[in-house]
Amino acid sequence: MSTLSVIIPSYNEESNIERTAETIGRILSEAQIEYELLFVSDGSSDKTYELVCNLAKRDAHIKGLEFSRNFGKEATIFAGLSCAKGDCCAVIDCDLQHPPETLVEMYRLWEQGYEVIEGIKSSRGKEGLIHKMFVGIFYGIMSKLMKIDMNATSDFKLMDRKVVDALLTLNEKNTFFRALSFWVGFKSTTVTFDVQERVAGKSKWSFTSLVKYAISNTTSFTTAPLQFVTFIGVIMIIFSVVLGVQTLVKYFMGTAVEGFTTVILLLLIIGGCIMISLGIIGHYLSRIFDEVKGRPRYIIRNKTDNF
């Protein structure tokens, strides 16, 4: 029988570990799906990994990894994929805001020959207005860049072993899993789900961390911000030519206005554009620096005994 590996990124989720393991295990057992649950503790400071170890001793289906420190969700996903043994692999949040019942539907579609089954949000649950607006802008930009609608996508998906192997061949350290699963191609389909309310614990994502996550993923996947620098340059050249012509016409007509207001405004505008452009270029240089150092995406401190 084919085995489903379920990768569960976990960061300070001690209040959810046991419930998540029991819920997913029960649902997959009832559906007669052979499975393994792979919890990846992202440098948790609570008892997350300790609880996983205790569960692994009682249930052979449960395995766990512990990072040496916090490396981020992207790292946990790829660590789980690299250690998973299943014929297909799914990624699901530890707080069960991704409904585990949908895993069965995804698995049945995989049995029909689909190689990537994407979880698409039909609703986003309870989110603040600013958060929804920010998410909408980010995924709107990414959708245009990728030519794929990413507005309702998530990390909740199931992939065939050949897709997982293709993702693991990518050498880049700064990854955007949600977009890369589209990029690799393969035969894909979607399932819709409603985001569930978190029963225990609280979200680890603040507005600041979401902004950093968006910037990191945008620059790791596309060069559009660099093209924006060029766009700013073209606009400033056009603006300068128009203003230059206007200034010369007024000068020869004897109506030029004395003073430094225009000069000051030009310096502020041009200076601001230059600083923004240097910031964007500098960010890409820092990404290149990170890549050429060749450091690993993550460091595994511990594994449960049943690996």
Image: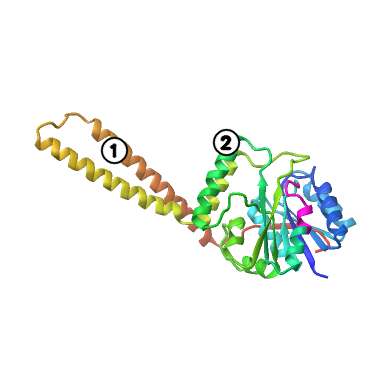
Mark 2 is surrounded, within 10 Å at the Cα level, by few (under 14), some (14 to 19) or many (20 or more) other residues, namely few
Are the residues tagged 2 and 1 within 8 Å (C-beta)? no
Horizontal side, residue 103 vs residue 272: left or right = right
Q: Residue at x 62, y 65 (%)?
A: 167
Q: Which residues are magenta?
A: 96-104
Q: Which mark is residue 191?
A: none
Q: Nearer the viewer, residue 245 or 263?
A: 245
In the image, is residue 98 part of the stretch drawn in magenta?
A: yes
**Kind of residue indicated by mark 2:** Ile
Q: Is residue 89 above or below residue 19?
A: below
On the rendered structure, is 301 left or right of 294?
Answer: right
Q: Earlier in the sequence, mark 2 or mark 1?
A: 2
Along the line of sight, the residue nearer the viewer: 37 or 129: 129
* Furthest residue toward right: 58
The image position of residue 89, as x and y in percent, is 73, 63
Gap between marks 2 and 1 measured at Cα: 33 Å
Q: Which residue is mark 2?
A: 130
- Quarter of the image with the C terminus in it: bottom right
The residue at which mark 1 appears reads as 267
Residue drawn at the location 24% of the way across and 35% of the way down: 263
114 lies above or below 203: below
User: How did the renderer colour the structure?
Assistant: rainbow
Residue name at image x 52 percent, y 56 percent: 220
**Amino acid of disc 1:** Leu
Residue 155 screen position, x and y as percent: 66, 54
